[in-house]
Image (cartoon, helix red, strand yellow):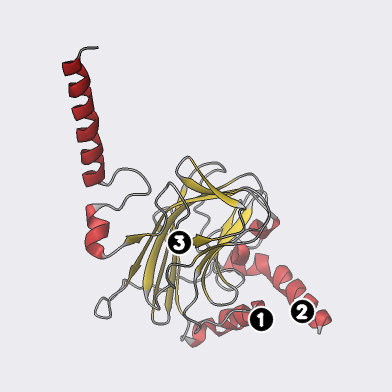
Amino acid sequence: MTHHRWLAVLVMVMFSCTVAELAGDGPNILTVKEKTAGFELLFNGTDLKGWEHKDNWVVEDGAIARKRGGGDLTYKAKKIPDDFELRFEWKVAKGSNSGIYYRPGQYEYQILDNKVHGDGKNPRTSAASLYFCMAPSKDATKPVGEWNTGKIVCQGSIIQHWLNGERVLDFDYNSSKWAKEVELLKIRGGDVKARGDYLHLQDHGDPVWYRAIKLRTIPKDEQIDHKAMPIPEDYLKREKAFVDAHLKRQKEKK
């Protein structure tokens, strides 16, 4: 190949990269719209700068992967704001279980293979649930091995979980309507009013992958769209035996 042709190819590659960056192509790049909204990238797709772990998490093909036992992966560069929006993508292997902890204590956005793992039998512990507290309104997961998009939005006493573009959980924990759910979280070891923790990606002993982790602080003058979503009645019936068994185990430990 001649010198001029090499130069032309190099210019085309550089131009393509610039266009991709401007367009926000790729999961680990902020779009212009996300930058304008105030999002920051917590994972750059190449290394785990800012994250703390015991060499059991690695980066492969632009994603964070759990490779061996050793504990959770924690983002230590900054704590989660009180009011925030967190976006991320996740996928699991067959039967895998993981979770995203975004507030102190047992405060978890569940990551799960609903079809195989036992937690998938109880909606209140299924994928996108606020684990053992609030069930998602539906199972919006994609098949194992495919990427799911997740989102957590918190403002004041409102908590929302999104999965694959659908708002599957939205409630105000100050409402007396959800007193039972708040009590369940307390039994689990979480406090709905707790704030100021680091972001944790759970090592539950199973293969799991994360990418496109983006965070923004929700400004005080911004009002999020809130639409309370009740737990379907069939979900409540299916979970009763699970909850009763858990409470019995808790009582026996005392």
Dot 3: element: loop
Q: Are marks 1 and 3 in contact (CB under 8 Å)?
A: no
Relative to residue 11, is residue 155 depicted above or below? below
Q: Residues within 10 Å of mark 3 (few under 14, many from 20)?
A: few
Residue that label 1 marks: 187
| 77 left or right of 52 in image | left
Position of the N terminus by quadrant: top left
Mark 1 lies on a secondary structure that is helix
Dot 1, crowdedness within 10 Å: few (<14), some or many (≥20)?
Answer: some
Q: Is residue 160 above or below residue 151?
A: below
Q: Earlier in the sequence, mark 3 or mark 2?
A: 3
Q: Label 1 sits on what residue type?
A: Ile
On screen, 59 above or below 9?
below
- Label 2 sits on a secondary structure element that is helix
Which of the image's four quarters has the C terminus?
bottom right
Q: Relative to residue 186, is residue 30 drawn left or right? A: left
Residue at label 2? 250
Tell me what residue is drawn at x 27 percent, y 58 percent.
Answer: 34
Residue under label 3, please give it: 50
Distance of label 3 from label 2 (alpha carbons): 36 Å
| Mark 1 touches mark 2? (CB < 8 Å) | yes
Q: Nearer the viewer, mark 3 or mark 2?
A: 3
Furthest toward the right, the residue is 252
> Mark 2: which amino acid?
Gln
Q: Nearer the viewer, residue 8 or 33?
A: 8
Residue at the top extreme?
1
Q: Residues within 10 Å of mark 2 (few under 14, many from 20)?
A: few
